[in-house]
Image (tube, rainbow, N blue to C red):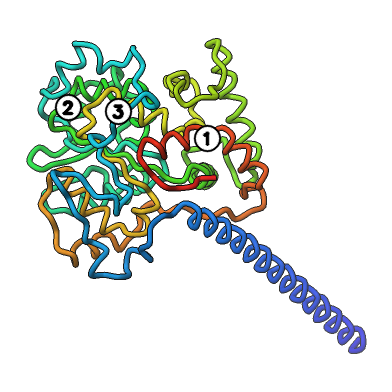
């Protein structure tokens, strides 16, 4: 009996050792695999950053005494920053508004420099792009003593109402206006306002163009695509996506959907940026990640239908690298009193709604898929660089 008992103990100990060895090997493989993918992602991001930057600044927390120094002349920023006022953008023959632009109608012009239906609107609209830093910028503004944001304790829908793009005519205007404080400046950060072709005129008609400020952030479109895809993978609001979702399949789906709706309206994907209006009003039927990266289409729609002098365009990467510098520009643009250098750095020391890195093989975009995606973006990337005088390379 004792011999059998000893053998039984030895057998159990051997199985336990085997189990622990197997578990350790599995854990080691997972750690090595994860580390390899993160290295790949960091290398990819480093490549994007190196190619996408013309800035000499080393980051938001270096050269503390000089980062915040920028010059203004009659309200216009110098070329030391990629930030652009819409008023500085002269629309030449390469960037002309189509004849059907709302701003060319007498009805739209009556609101352009005047008041809208109500004076109770928020004064600031951060309209996108998605995953371009809109949540962080809205939170930074909300820390100013004279600005009060909405939903700032809710990390999911900070500042977002979806009113002018998705809920317009579905809920009352008063329901929308009651979301905002009455005694302080406030703002709306609904990023779909950039994409919806009717949003500029709706805001113009409701809120007026004289005092309404619009802020647009533009991020490297491929990085934005990956970040938006990962948000869908990990976000509970997107039931069709899970860890098994493939970014390759997502891209093919987006291309198919875009071509389908273009074909339904007897249109083909344009080969010239001057045909941008062919892609304009596909928001409701073609909501996908690829479509959201056609920045030139949406920026031109806003410039053609809203007072250009009240539009500020920011490069997202510049805001990521030196947020205090960008925040100072934004405060000046919207008319809030300046803050001290220490306050600016304290406010911008936190990143909100930070994205997640790809963490499984199917979540990484291959070089072939990058080229395919850029084939849809290239002419519009070149056009936005020309429009904004950005010496960048998003290839």
Residue at position x 31%, y 16% in the image: 101
Residue at position x 24%, y 50% in the image: 78
Upstream in sequence: badge 1 or badge 3: 3
* Number of the label disc, if any, that sits on residue 303: 3
The picture places residue 171, in percent across and down from the top left corner, at: 27, 21
- Discs 2, 1 touching: Cβ within 8 Å: no
Look at discs 3 and 2 and give the one toward the viewer.
3
Q: Judge by depth and name the residue closer to the eye, 93 or 368.
A: 93
Look at discs 2 and 1 and give the one toward the viewer.
1
Upstream in sequence: badge 2 or badge 1: 2
Q: What is the CA distance from the residue labelled 1 to the residue labelled 3?
A: 20 Å
Q: Which residue is tagged 2? A: 209
Q: What is the CA distance from the residue labelled 2 to the residue labelled 1?
A: 31 Å
The picture places residue 180, in percent across and down from the top left corner, at: 17, 37
Q: Which residue is tagged 1? A: 377
Q: Judge by depth and name the residue closer to the eye, 90 or 374.
A: 90
Q: Residues within 10 Å of mark 2 (few under 14, many from 20)?
A: many
């Amino acid at each position: 009996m004792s011999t059998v008992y000893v053998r039984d103990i030895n057998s159990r100990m051997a199985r336990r050792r085997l189990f622990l060895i197997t578990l350790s090997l599995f854990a080691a493989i997972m750690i090595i695999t994860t580390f390899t993918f993160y290295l790949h992602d960091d290398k990819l991001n480093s490549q994007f950053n190196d190619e996408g930057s013309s800035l000499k600044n080393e980051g938001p927390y270096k050269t503390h005494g000089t980062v915040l120094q920028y010059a203004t002349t009659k309200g216009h920023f110098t070329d030391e920053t990629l930030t652009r006022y819409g008023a500085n953008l002269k629309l030449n023959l390469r960037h002309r508004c189509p004849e059907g632009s709302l701003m060319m109608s007498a009805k739209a012009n009556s609101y352009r420099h005047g008041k809208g239906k109500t004076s109770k609107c928020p004064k600031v609209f951060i309209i996108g792009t998605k995953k371009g830093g809109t949540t962080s910028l809205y939170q930074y503004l909300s820390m100013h003593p004279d600005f009060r944001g909405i939903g700032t304790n809710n990390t999911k829908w900070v500042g977002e109402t979806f009113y002018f793009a998705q809920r317009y005519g579905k809920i009352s205007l008063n329901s929308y206006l009651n979301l905002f404080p009455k005694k302080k400046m406030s703002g709306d950060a609904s990023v779909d306002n950039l994409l919806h072709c009717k949003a500029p005129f709706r805001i113009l008609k409701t809120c007026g163009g004289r005092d309404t400020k619009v802020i647009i952030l533009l991020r490297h479109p491929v990085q934005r695509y990956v970040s938006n895809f990962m948000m869908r993978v990990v976000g509970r609001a997107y039931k069709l996506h899970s860890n098994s979702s493939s970014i390759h399949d997502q891209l093919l789906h987006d291309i198919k959907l875009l071509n389908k709706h273009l074909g339904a309206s007897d249109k083909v994907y344009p080969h010239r940026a001057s045909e941008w209006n062919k892609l304009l009003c596909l928001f409701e039927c073609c909501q996908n990640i690829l479509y959201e990266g056609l920045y030139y289409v949406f920026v031109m729609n806003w410039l053609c239908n809203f007072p250009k002098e009240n539009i500020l365009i920011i490069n997202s990467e510049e805001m990521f690298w030196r947020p205090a510098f960008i925040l100072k520009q934004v405060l000046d643009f919207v008319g809030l009193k300046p803050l001290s250098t220490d306050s600016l750095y304290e406010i911008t020391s936190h990143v909100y709604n930070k994205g997640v890195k790809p963490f499984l093989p199917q979540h990484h975009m291959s070089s072939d898929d990058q080229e395919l995606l850029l084939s849809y973006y290239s002419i519009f990337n070149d056009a936005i660089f020309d429009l904004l005088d950005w010496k960048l390379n998003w290839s």
